[in-house]
Amino acid sequence: MATDPIAARPILPTAPTRPVRWYTLLTYGANDVMGAGSMAVISTWILIFYTSFCGLSAAQATIIFGVARVLDAFTSPLIGHVSDNIGRTWLGRRFGRRRFFILAAIPLLPSFAIMWVAGQSFWYYLVTYVLFEMVYAMEIIPYETLASEMATDYRTKAKFAGARILCGQCSAIAAAFLPAWLIGWLGPDSPDTYLYMGIIFSVLFMLAAGLLYTFSWERQRPPELAAAEERDRPTLGAAFAALYRNLFSTLRIRAFRLHLGMYLGGYISQDIYNAAFTYFVIFALAGSTAIVGQLVGVTYIVQLVAVVIAINFALRLSPAAAYRFATLSFAIGVLIFLGMYMAGYTATSALFWLPVVFAGLGRGALNYIPWATYNYMADVDEIVTGRRREGAFAGVMTFVRKMSQAAAVILVGQVMQASGFVSKASVQSPTAIAAIVGVLGLGTIAMLVFGALVSTRFRLTPATHAVLLDEIERLRAGGTRPATPDTGRIVEDLSGWRYDQLWGRNPVAAR
């Protein structure tokens, strides 16, 4: 077995992977019923539920999100780190270092339903929300590593991302239409609408997680690597020290930094839009929660179509170019909404389906592209460090996702509170309505512009990814120079490091 003279680590061949079947893609994608589904429900309905049925002020609602995010700043990267290292233990060897967490989370997923019990205290909603966020991190972070565990090539990883987003969009459609159906059954003033919605989604979460565990697998690690990990098992103190060292070291990978910028631009813009949209329709456009469900539901249907288009675009051309087209479409939709509001249209106007289509096309692509490119980040990291750290990247992604959503909800809630928004009121003041409109328009478009600017520097494509994998194999075989000067420039651009610093010859690789 060859040895890396710089990093003094054994160089192990890439383990063969199992064939990916249609049902593998389906069961993998179905788990995003929890990922996208729960986030769609929370971003669309949680503020309305807290302020209209629970007696909480907008400020109290944002405190709940803030506390949960502080706790999550610790738990998300911790779970990512533990999932990277639990393979050394009996549990990891028996159930899988990623899949163990998915299995353990299944009986805890009904925690989503108990969030939606009306008439409780502030502390009840704080504790139940925090509890679900912990369970969410426990299941989703290991899930986000599985595509890289089960596949190595660009196209298969793109198919995993596509299956995930397509299934996630279907769950988001249900998150929009289900409350509208329940409102029609229970009446517009019944808080049980949200409780039944929580119960239905909890059952779906458990079913999806069970199928994922059954039909997924993890890449077989060579016996030499498993033995080396067992010898090098860190102490508890060393594990905690490595946790945040690995967390911040992911930001030293150039492609990942740019990826995060695009991710934040695309997702925070949607989080701001989602948090403000319900209030925008109800108070600025004289609509209702039933109309909100219809508009949001149609948006998600259009997003489903947009994901199919984006999958083909990203596979054949450039994810960054597809991303810029998506930001433009979403921004056009928002601008049309604002223009129609200023012209005096109400939510019952048939013309409101036009901005819904533009916004949905943009949002669908923005949902898919960051997760498609995420699946290749561990490959870029591998050429820098000589290691596979999917768990560390998954921890950062989940942490950033939750923080971005909380920031959007906190922004909307605090602006509404400062503008004089009154909980449980059927009519709001002109100042409060102007604040809602301003957040929806300026906040959403500002983040779209930020993401589009970052995307101009992101150059990971099918062609450059193929070059990256070839160079990884060259370095694994003991090579020290790129195949061609162009190859070297491509790898350096993706990694952010000089070629002679790759494969462990840099501070990022330090354990």
Image (cartoon, rainbow, N blue to C red):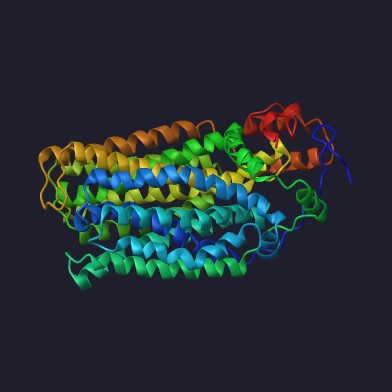
Q: Residue at x 44, y 45 (%)?
A: 71
Q: Give how far across and how far down residue 448 sits, in percent.
A: 38, 37
Q: Can residue 392 be seen here?
A: yes
Q: Residue at x 51, y 47 (%)?
A: 76
Q: Give how far across and how far down residue 375 sits, in percent.
A: 59, 48
**Front position in the image: 117 or 179:** 117
Q: Give how far across and how far down residue 59 sits, in percent.
A: 25, 43
Task: From this view, report whether residue 242 is shown above or below residue 453.
Answer: below
Task: From this view, report whether residue 297 is shown above or below residue 459.
Answer: below
**Front position in the image: 33 or 85:** 85
**Front position in the image: 112 or 482:** 112
Task: From this view, report whether residue 155 is shown above or below residue 255.
Answer: below
Q: Give how far across and how far down residue 236 sits, in percent.
A: 64, 45
Which residue is at the far right? 1
**Left or right position of 395 against 11:** left
Q: Can residue 267 be seen here?
A: no
Q: Quadrant of the C terminus?
A: top right
**Front position in the image: 68 or 489:** 68
The mark total stands at 0
**Quarter of the view holding residue 414:** top left
**Quarter of the view holding residue 160:** bottom right
Which residue is at the far bottom? 185
Q: Residue at x 31, y 57 (%)?
A: 124
